Image (cartoon, rainbow, N blue to C red):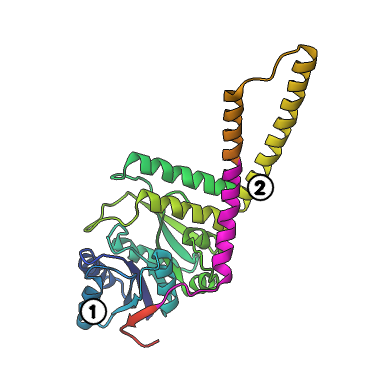
Amino acid sequence: MKKISIVVPCYNEQEAIPYFYEEAKKVSETIPNTEFEFLFVNDGSKDNTLNVLRDLSKKDEQVKYISFSRNFGKEAAMYAGLKEASSDYIAIMDADLQDPPSLLPSMFDTLEKGEYDCVATRRVTRKGEPRIRSFFAKLFYKIMNAISNTEVVDGARDFRLMTRQMVNAILEISEYNRFSKGIFGFVGFHTKWLEYENIERVAGKTKWSFWKLLLYSLDGFTAFSTKPLILSTIAGIIFFIISLIMILVIIFKTFIFGDPVGGWPSLACIILFVGGIQLFCTGISGQYLAKTYLEVKHRPIYIVKERNFDV
């Protein structure tokens, strides 16, 4: 009998968890010769999420949970779930049912055949999302795949079912600044992609604002590519060459044609423009320096305050 762990990161999901549990439980009972465990990771929720998980665990011994001492972020929650899971196959799913549990049987059957190490999902539509958010999401994937050697599939979800071997490889990457979509691609292994249309949340509100998604995308750029640093270097070389050309033009116009140098408005614009480029390049370097600073301190990715099972 094979064992499957469902890792569910939760942050303020008190309304969605009962719906998710009921649906996932029904699906798990349709897969023969398998044993399930539902491993919920409470990421420092401020609502009644922890009490909901406590009640579920009392009713069903298959329900396990760990609760963080504070909010460490979804990346930390996923890492903790993968680390604590002990099954042959491990899945990551959101509690809001945007990741349909109905796909689990076909995902399990695919892995059982032995040809694939992972079955992952991607959305083919973004119905229900604001257009501006969808536009920037697509732009992110294009830029990411252009500057990184690690492929990040457009529309990829965190929802995937993986073999123990692949999960162990992911856990070996214990970096503090985590970008799982890149890590999944970095470790390799043979992945089959399942496509489905976007599904609305069953309850609650999304925790991902536009600003948080923007910062998350920056984490992806810095985690899996150094080309932004090369870009800043190239920008410096280009502006140095332009400055030499402009100096020669000014000298030529002044001594040959007696043309006076332009006034302060054009000079102010040039200074502001070049100064902005300098700050942009400094900011890129600062991002990499900040990530390095966080890594070398070796702080724990998460801290567990409470759990309902033995380590």
Q: Which residue is mark 1?
A: 54
The crowding category of the residue bearing disc 2, from other C-alpha atoms within 10 Å (few below 14, some 14 to 19, many at least 20), is few
Quadrant that contains the N terminus: bottom left
Quarter of the image with the C terminus in it: bottom left
- Give the main secondary structure, helix, strand or loop, of the magenta stretch: helix
158 and 218: which is toward the camera: 218
**Closest to the observer, 73 or 90:** 73
Q: Is residue 80 visible from the viewing direction of this image?
A: yes
166 vs 256, left or right, is: left
On screen, residue 209 above or below 117: above
| Residue plotted at (49% across, 69% down) | 114
Q: Amino acid at mark 2?
A: Ile
Where is residue 41, by image quadrant? bottom left
Front residue (pair 124, 145): 145
Find the distance from the CA under tag 1 to the CA under tag 2: 50 Å
> Residue 65: x percent and y percent?
31, 77
Residue placed furthest toward the top: 257
Give the percent coordinates (x, y) of residue 70. Answer: 35, 72
Element type where label 1 sits in the image: helix
Mark 1 and 2 residues: CB-CB less than 8 Å, in contact? Answer: no
- Residue 162 image offset from top left, x and y in percent: 45, 68
What residue did someone put label 2 on?
230
Mark 1 or mark 2, whichever is nearer to me: 2
Q: Residue at x 22, y 57 (%)?
A: 202
Dot 1 amino acid type: Arg
Whether 238 is drawn above or below 19: the answer is above
Q: Is residue 301 magenta?
A: yes
Residue extent of the magenta highlight: 278-303
Q: Residues within 10 Å of mark 1 (few under 14, many from 20)?
A: some
Q: Kindly tell me whether residue 152 is visible in this rendering.
A: no
